[in-house]
Image (cartoon, coloured by chain):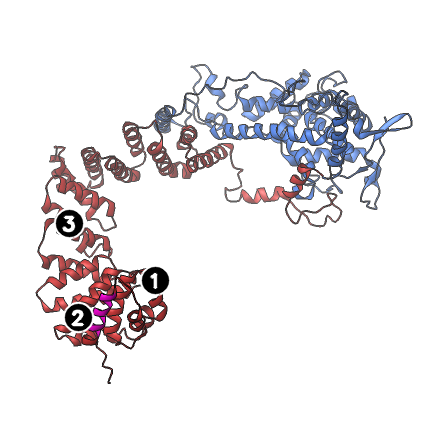
Chain colours: A red, B blue
Amino acid sequence: MSDFSEELIRSKTEDDKEESCVFSGTGMSFPWLQKHIGTVETGGKKEKDFAQTTSACLGFIQEALLKHQWQQAADYMHSYFQILEDSDSHKRQAAPEIIWKLGSEILFYHPKSSVETFNTFADRMKNIGVMNYLKISLQHALYLLHHGMLEDANRNLSFHLRTFSLWADEDDYAYNTASQNMFDHSWKTSVNLRALIQTPGVWDPFVKSYVEMLEFYGDQDGAREVLTNYAYDEKFPSNPNAHIYLYNFLKREKAPREKLISVLKILYQIVPSHKLMLEFHRLLRKSEKEDHHKLGLEVLFGVLDFAGCTKNITAWKYLAKYLRQTLMGNHLAWVQEEWKTRKNWWPSFHFSSFWAKSDWKEDKALACEKALVAGILLGKGCRYFRFISKQDDQVLRKKIKQIKKSVKKHSVVNPGL
Amino acid sequence: MTMPRTLAFCYLSLLWQRETITLSDLLRFVEEGHIPYINAFQHFPEEMKLYGRDKGIFAIESWPTYEDIYKKVIEIAKFLDLPRFPDITEDSYLHPNILCMKYLMEVNLPDEMNDLTCQVVKMTGIGEVDFLTFDPIAKMAKTVKYDVQAVAVIVVVLKLLFLLDDNLEWTLSNIAEKYNEKNKEDKPWFDFRKWYQVMKKSIDEKKQKWEEARAKYLWKSEKPLYHSSIDRAVVYKRREMVVSLQKQFSALVDSAPTVEKKSPSSFQFNWTEGDSARTCFHGHGLQGILKKKGQSLTTKNSLYWLSTQKFCRSYCKHVTTYEESNFSLSYQFIINLFSFLLRIKTSSLHEEVSLIEKILFKRKYGKTKKKSRSRKGRKY
C-alpha cells in the first residue's frame, strides 16, 4: 500500500473496526438523537445559522489574534459587529464586552491603527450600555497613559467620570450642584477619580497613575492623602501594594524616618518576606530607639525564614554584621529569643552540609557570611562552619581567618556547657 | 406563507416546467445570493411598509435546508391539490442518466462510468417515467430527490468498481499506476489514488472558503425591521452603531480586490484537459478495473458490502442511521464529498444509497438468513 492509503488508515482511531461491513451491528447509535438532546438547552429550537455565523466568526477572530494576523482579525471583526443586532437578548447584552476586548486588542496592535482610531472606537463603545461606560473609560485612559498622553488621559477621564457621576448620583442633590459648578477642564476635576478610588477595592494601576498625575502637577498633599487613604482605610481589602506605594512616595518626599518606619511596620506584618524589609532593617538600625534595634533583628530573622530569600547575600551580610553588633551591645537576650523558635529547624534549613558544599560552589562570599552566622549561632563545631573554615581559597583566606576570630569571640554557644 | 414556503413554491413551478435546475442548485443559488431570500424585503418598493408580524416572516436567520424545503414542496403540492406533473422522460435534465453524467463530470470521474450508472438505473427501475414523475394525488405522494438519487447511484457504482473497503481501491490504484508508468502514450487507466489526491485538495479548499464566507456573512440589512414604533428607535440606533463600527474597521482592512460576484452556475467545479496542475480524469479509461468475461466486461471486483443491513420498519422518520465510524474512510470521503456538493446532510445521502441498494439487491434483503458479503457479477 502506498502512502496515501496508509495516511488514511493512520488517521483512523484505535477502536475502528477493520471490517467496514457492519456484521455485529448490535450497538444502536442514533446520531440524530444527540442533536435533539443538544437543543434542550435552547428550548427545543435548533441553533439558527445566524448564531452559527457569529460563533464561527468569533472563532476566526480568536485564531487570527493568536497568530497575530491583525488584518484578518479586523476583517472578521467587521462582520462580527452584527452580533449587536442579535435577536437573542442574552447574546446581545454580552456582546459589547467581547467586542471591546477584541476590538481594543486589534486596534492596539494593528499597524494602520492610530490613537485617533482608538479614541473613536472607545467613545463609541462607551455609549453602548451604561455599565460598560466607566470600565471602558478607565481602560481608555490607561491606553492613553501608555502612549504618554498624560493630559489627554486626564481630560478624557475627568470628563467621562463627571458625566458618569452625574448619572450615578441622581439622588444626591448637593453633590450634583457642586459637580455641576465645576466647569474647568483642569486637572482639579480629577477629584471625581478620587471618588472612584474611595470605593473599596483594588485599584492599583489607577492609583499609581493618578498619583503620578498629581505629582506631575505638584499636588503633593493630594497625593499623600490618596495614598494614605488607600493604605489605611479599613474598608479596603488588605493590600500590600498600597503600603509600598505610600512608602515609595514618602521616600521621594524625604519624609522623617519615624514616618517611614511606621509605614513599613505594617508591611512587615503583612508580607515579612518582602524585599523592602531589608530597607526597613536599615532604617531601624539607624534609628535611636532601642525597640527599633530589637525589631531590626526580628525583621532580619523574619526575612531569612523564607525559602525565597535563602540565597540573598545582602540579608546574610546584614545578619552577620548585626549579630556581632547586637552581641557587642550586650543584647544576648534578644538573640536568644529569636533563636529559640528557630534552633530546631534553621540548622537543616540553612546550615546542612549539603548547603555548605552547594553554597561554596555557587557563591563563596555568600558562604562566608552564612558561615559566620552559623558559627555564632551554632558554635564552631557545626558542620557548616567547619566545612567553610577548612576551605582554602586565595581570595578569601583573610576573610575566613576573620570569621574564625569573630566566632571565637562572639559565639552564643559555649563549648563547655 | 413564509419565505421557505415561497421557495418551495418556486421549486414546484420549476419542476412543472422541467427546468434544468435541481433543488440543491436552487438552494445553493440562494446561499450565494443570486436569489433574494435573506433580506428580500430590501428590494420591495418604498411604499410597502413592513412592521409587526412581517418581521417574523422576513427577518430570516437561517438558510433553507434541503430536507425542510423538500417536505414543504410536498405539503404545498398536496394543499394546492395539484394534478400529476408533466412526465419526466429520458430526455429531461432531471432523468438520472443525465444527472449522473452531470455529476460525474463535476467530480472529475471518467466518462466511461456513465455506462455503469445507466446500467444501475435500468436495473433498479428508477429511470421509469412513472417512478420519476411527481404525483401529489398518489397515495404515497413523493417526489424523487433527483439530485440526491443521481449522486447515490454514482456512489453505488464506485462501490461496485472499487469496493471502498480501504484496501482494494488502493491495490487497484497500484496496478493502474504501474500500467500508466509503462504506457505513457496510451489512454491512461483511471487511478483512484490520484483522483483522491486531486479531489481532496480541491474540496478542502472549497470547504474552507465556504466556511469563511459563512463566518463573514452579514445577515442584517440596511433597513432594519422592527415590531412596533417603540422598537423602531432602538433598532435604528443599533443599526447606526453597527454601521459606524464597521466603517471604522473596514478602513483597517486592506482594500484588497473584492471577489467579483460570480454569475450563477450549475457547476461548482470545472475540469479541463491539459491542465497540469489539476488533472482531469474525464478521458481516463476503466480497463484497469474491468475484465473480460465471455462477450462482455465485468468488474474485477466481485464483492460488495451493503450500506444498511436492516431497514427500520417502525414509524420513525428515518429508515436507517449513519454512524461514520462504522464505515471505511474511503466511503466516508465519498459521502462527505457529495454531501458537500449538494449541501445536504451525510445521513441523507447515506440513506439514499441504502435505498438504491435495497432495490438492487432485493433478493438479498428478502432472505432471512444474513450473509456477510454478497457476490454479484456485473454484466454489460
Residue type indicated by callout 2? Arg
Tag 3 near tag 1, CB within 8 Å: no
Please say if A294 is above or below A69: below
The disc placed on residue A361 is 1
Residue at mark 3 = A249
Chain of the residue under label 3: A
> Which one is earlier in the sequence, the residue at label 2 or at label 1?
2
Which one is nearer the viewer's eye here, B105 or B294? B294
Chain letter of the residue carrying label 2: A
Crowding around mark 1 (Cα neighbors within 10 Å: few <14, some 14 to 19, many 20+) is few
Q: Main secondary structure of the magenta part?
A: helix
What amino acid is labelled 1 in the image?
Answer: Lys
Chain ID for label 1?
A
| Chain part drawn in magenta | A397-407
Residue found at x 71% / y 18%: B93
Q: CA distance from mark 3 to mark 1?
A: 40 Å
Most extreme residue toward the bottom, as rendered? A417
Where does the N terminus of chain B fall, quadrant-wise?
A: top right
Which is more foreground, mark 2 or mark 3? Answer: 2
* Front position in the image: A141 or A172: A141
Label 2 in the same subunit as label 1: yes
For residue A324, the mark is 2
- Amino acid type at circle 3 is Phe
**Callout 2 secondary element:** helix
The location of residue A342, given as percent across then percent down, is 27, 73
Q: Residues within 10 Å of mark 2 (few under 14, many from 20)?
A: many
The answer to which of marks 2 and 3 sits earlier in the sequence is 3
